[in-house]
Image: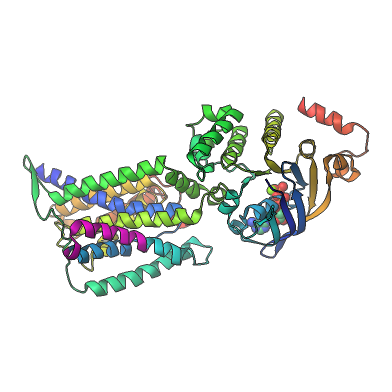
């Protein structure tokens, strides 16, 4: 187990600067949230970590390290081999393949015994994936696809899991379910870097959070600090007057 | 009636061989989205080696060597040319393969010269009789071998880890790489498999009733292009069906060309392309395809 650290990351897509000197740290075993508006550079950050910028003709300076190993410049498959696995934005399940084959695709690099163990864990976490194992993934509902996307990533045996807006477009009940799952995955020892627009949910899970604004870290701190920060409350939680307890009420009504 | 059955079996046999070529073409397209115009030259390379080697090491060893060599040449093209060519567009890569094709074919035809090289196969010109129907042994061996290879390929594609990796990479390369799938290996293995299939196809294009391998063999191989395209460039089923359609059409058209004299001589050679055009007019993505060639 090792900390994932990003320092002075500068990413450009041609002339477009998407990240301008971002640094952050995901301590081993923790959940860290990255918040920010559309276009802030959240997905770009995950691409830079996973080594998939080349698919978008992006280029990157600065460094990404896992413990004392550099991940910068490695290709995506090697990064996965080091234990850093991403669940991309929009789920991106292999729609034409069966649910089972999607899980297989996630665990291809692993020895048979580890594979079987990971598979058991995943279907225990998401029993629906077992029920639908022979169905084409494209036919699953949005929530089920998100479970499949997470399950598929877990098949690779991540020590650090990168999640890009896992609750996007899901009904509250399903979003809560995913939130619980993230907690559970983390409790088994996997570090999580969680990108979210649902600030209340992200802050409830994470110990630490970063707020990105047009490619820069605008704010950072523990979740408790950010939750009480006027700036975050005003801009991301939509609370105009800092009424004591407003957030808690909101959270409760949302999840109950 | 016997003529019809003979033409049908011969058509299916040659169609199965076209299907082998078309299948390779489709695998490469699926794995790398490159239309490989160098496919005919791979086939020629495999066949040429078999023809040159069998007098030295015997037919079976020569065949094995030819298959391995074609696989290696294909993998080398992927590794040295396709992967290095730092161009973003797949259409540009397709043009790069035309360049590769010209280089390979020119060199091989120079080596072959005006010779017609025998393949040294054990079947010769023997025929088998079923009632009144006479079929050359080579045609039956071709049909059976192609059917076995295609079945093996489709099973591997569906059930093995290699197949899962291929399909994942074909559907969404970026996500496949996020799952730890090595795209370079996937694409190189696709090229190698396609090369090996092409070498087997070369053998069956050059045995009886064809006199042997000569400089025009790669032109014959070109008939597999319409097979792949009419079936749908990204569909393995399409390659199979396309191959059979082309083979049977060609065989029937040549067999009955005296009855269709109004169409002129040599209609058998033109028929594959006509069939392709008609099918593409009705279904632009081919029978089973999801991607139109124009969008490549
Ligand atoms: N492939 C690309 N080519 C060019 N520019 C891009 C590309 N992808 C993203 N960008 C630009 O980079 C910036 C950051 O985009 P990014 O997708 O990282 O934002 P995000 O925070 O993930 O947004 P969202 O919440 O909408 O997913 C944006 O200005 C975007 O327009
Ligand atoms: Mg995003």
Residue B75, image quadrant: bottom left
Pick the residue in front: B185 or B29: B185
Instruction: Tell me where residue B17 appears, x and y as whole percent.
Output: 25, 52
Inspect the magenta stretch and tell me whether residue B131 lies in it: no
Instruction: Tell me where residue A220 appears, x and y as whole percent.
Output: 83, 48
Above or below — where is A162 with respect to A216?
A: above
Pick the residue in front: A125 or B13: A125
Figure quadrant of the N terminus of chain A: top right
Left or right side of A197 for B15: left
Above or below — where is B61 with respect to A116?
A: below
Above or below — where is A31 with respect to A53?
A: above
Magenta stretch in the rendered image: B55-73
Left or right side of B99 for B88: right
Say if residue A215 shows up in the picture: no
Residue B195, image quadrant: bottom left
Say if residue B70 shows up in the picture: yes
Left or right side of B208 for B269: right
């Amino acid at each position: 187990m090792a900390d994932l650290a990003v320092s002075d990351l500068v990413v450009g897509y041609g002339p477009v600067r998407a990240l301008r000197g971002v640094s952050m740290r995901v301590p081993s075993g923790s959940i860290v949230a990255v918040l920010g508006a559309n276009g802030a550079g959240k997905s770009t950050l995950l691409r830079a970590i996973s080594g998939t910028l080349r698919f978008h003709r992006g280029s990157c300076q600065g460094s990404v390290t896992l413990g004392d190993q550099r991940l910068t410049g490695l290709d995506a498959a090697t990064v996965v081999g080091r234990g850093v696995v991403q669940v991309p934005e929009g789920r991106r399940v292999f729609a034409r393949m069966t649910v089972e084959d999607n899980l297989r695709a996630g665990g291809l690099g692993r020895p048979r015994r580890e594979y079987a163990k990971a598979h058991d864990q995943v279907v225990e976490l998401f029993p629906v994936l077992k029920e639908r194992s022979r169905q084409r993934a494209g036919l699953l509902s949005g929530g089920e696809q998100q479970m499949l996307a997470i399950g598929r990533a877990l098949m690779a045996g991540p020590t650090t899991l990168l999640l890009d807006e896992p609750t996007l477009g899901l009904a509250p009940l399903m979003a809560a379910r995913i939130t619980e799952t993230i907690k559970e995955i983390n409790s088994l020892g996997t570090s999580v870097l969680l990108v979210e627009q649902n600030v209340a949910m992200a802050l409830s899970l994470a110990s630490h959070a970063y707020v990105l604004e047009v490619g820069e870290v605008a704010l950072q701190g523990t979740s408790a600090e950010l939750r009480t920060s006027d700036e975050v409350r005003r801009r991301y939680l939509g609370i105009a007057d800092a009424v004591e307890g407003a957030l808690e009420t909101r959270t409760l009504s949302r999840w109950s | 009636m016997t003529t019809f059955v003979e033409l049908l079996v011969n058509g299916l046999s040659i169609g199965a061989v076209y299907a082998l070529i078309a299948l390779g073409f489709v695998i490469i397209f699926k794995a790398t989205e490159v239309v490989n115009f160098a496919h005919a030259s791979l086939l020629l390379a495999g066949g040429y080696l078999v023809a040159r080697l069998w007098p030295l090491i015997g037919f079976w060893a020569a065949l094995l060597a030819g298959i391995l060599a074609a696989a290696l040449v294909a993998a080398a093209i992927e590794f040295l040319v396709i992967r290095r060519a730092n161009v973003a567009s797949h259409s540009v890569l397709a043009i790069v393969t035309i360049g590769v094709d010209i280089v390979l074919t020119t060199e091989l035809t120079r080596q072959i010269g005006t010779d017609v090289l025998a393949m040294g196969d054990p079947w010769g010109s023997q025929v088998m009789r079923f009632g009144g129907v006479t079929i050359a042994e080579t045609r039956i061996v071709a049909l059976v071998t192609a059917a076995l290879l295609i079945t093996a390929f489709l099973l591997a594609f569906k059930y093995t880890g290699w197949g899962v990796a291929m399909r994942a990479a074909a559907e969404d390369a970026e996500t496949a790489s996020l799952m730890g799938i090595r795209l370079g290996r996937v694409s190189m293995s696709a090229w190698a498999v396609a090369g090996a299939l092409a070498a087997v196809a070369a053998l069956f294009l050059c045995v009886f009733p064809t006199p042997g391998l000569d400089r025009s063999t790669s032109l014959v191989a070109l008939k597999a292009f319409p097979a792949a395209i009419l079936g749908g460039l990204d569909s393995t089923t399409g390659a199979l069906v396309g191959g059979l359609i082309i083979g049977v059409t060609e065989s029937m058209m040549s067999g009955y060309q005296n009855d269709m004299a109004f169409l002129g001589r040599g209609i058998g050679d033109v028929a594959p392309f006509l069939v392709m055009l008609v099918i593409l007019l009705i279904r632009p993505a081919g029978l089973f395809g999801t991607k139109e060639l124009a969008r490549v």
